[in-house]
Amino acid sequence: AGSVCEQTMWLPLRSFTRPLSSAPRGPLIRRLAAVDSLQRRYTALEEETIRKQRALQLQLREAAAELQVRRQEIVSGSAEPTDAEVTSSDAFFSGREPDEPEDLAGAVGIPGFWKGVLGGADLHVNEEPAVSERDWEVLESLEEVRVEPWSTPGGEGDNDEMVAAAAAATGEEEAQEVPAGGHLLTFCFGPNRFFEPGAALLSSELLAHSLDGAGSVGPDGSAVLRLYCTEEGDVVGAAAAPFCEGRDPRSKVMVRKRKGKGKAGGERQRLGRPGAAFFPLF
């Protein structure tokens, strides 16, 4: 539709074989010249609007980054909120401060904040919960979540060299087009018993050639996982942590009896089955 609108503005001018400046100053030529002038004014207005939008978007990103840093300071307990931050909260408009939970007396920061955020989001995929019971066990150690913009070098999604590198990395003759950028979701996990200590993070082959190194899991299981998404929210790349054996929430563990000769009651066999969960996103 946009292309059609643009063509309808310029097409009448292209029917002339000589420049407007040398054409007779008849009524039709004057009208076409006026249309040309209006189109040029529109183009200039559009370009100026795009520049302003980019400037506003940059201001938003910088302000949002500051707010995320301040939020994490309060959540982690590295800083306490100011009176102004507290009294401007909707939770205190009633004038009565809620009672402190007895089981969290003396707690540092806000325990379980990010697990509560994900739980309150009511995430579903195909009408099924997107976070399984086994996911919640891992998410107990989630300490921080950040959302920020990301882009591939040069910001060009159809860069020939990048597409060729992706094809070589995946072993495919033709690789899908590398996205220009979008939103980066960073999940910071503290010490836990689920991620394999010291293991290198697993990065998506499609984006491995254009992004920074994925890093590795800490000796205590701590790790920083990342999801690279398009502007529309589709996941196109990730940096994931390997799980310790038997602690991967992405698979269901089923136990069945296997009968054997000479063995009373047989023996139990543990089988892994893929299951719907949060971590397959990585």
Image (cartoon, rainbow, N blue to C red):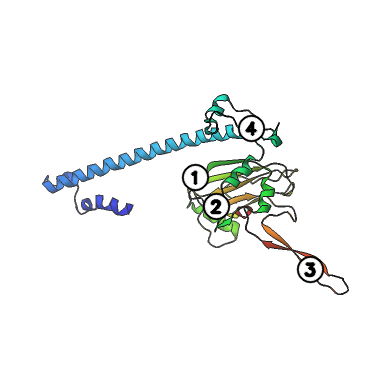
Q: Please provide percent x and percent y for residue 43.
A: 30, 42
Q: Of tags 2 and 4, which is closer to the observer?
A: 4
Q: Are marks 1 and 2 in contact (CB under 8 Å)?
A: no
Residue sticking out furthest to the top: 83
Q: Please provide percent x and percent y for residue 59.
A: 46, 34
Cα distance between the residues tagged 3 and 2: 39 Å
Q: Please provide percent x and percent y for residue 225.
A: 63, 46
Q: Of tags 4 and 1, which is closer to the observer?
A: 4
Q: Kindly identify the amino acid type of the residue bearing the numbered disc 4.
A: Asp
Is disc 1 placed on a helix, strand or loop? Answer: helix
Cα distance between the residues tagged 2 and 4: 41 Å
Q: Is residue 187 visible?
A: no
Question: What residue appears at the point 65 percent right and 60 percent down from the top-left corner?
Answer: 275
Name the disc covering residue 99, or none: 4
Quadrant placement of the N terminus:
bottom left
Q: Please provide percent x and percent y for residue 157.
A: 48, 51
Please give the residue where the numbered disc 3 appears in the rendered image: 257
Whichever of callouts 3 and 1 sits on the residue coming sooner in the sequence is 1
Q: Kindly identify the amino acid type of the residue bearing the numbered disc 2.
A: Val
Q: Is residue 227 visible?
A: yes
Residue sticking out furthest to the right: 262
Whichever of callouts 3 and 4 sits on the residue coming sooner in the sequence is 4
Circle 1: is it few (<14), some (14-19), or many (20+) Cα within 10 Å?
few
Cα distance between the residues tagged 1 and 2: 20 Å
Q: Are marks 4 and 1 in contact (CB under 8 Å)?
A: no
Please give the residue where the numbered disc 1 appears in the rendered image: 154
Cα distance between the residues tagged 3 and 4: 51 Å
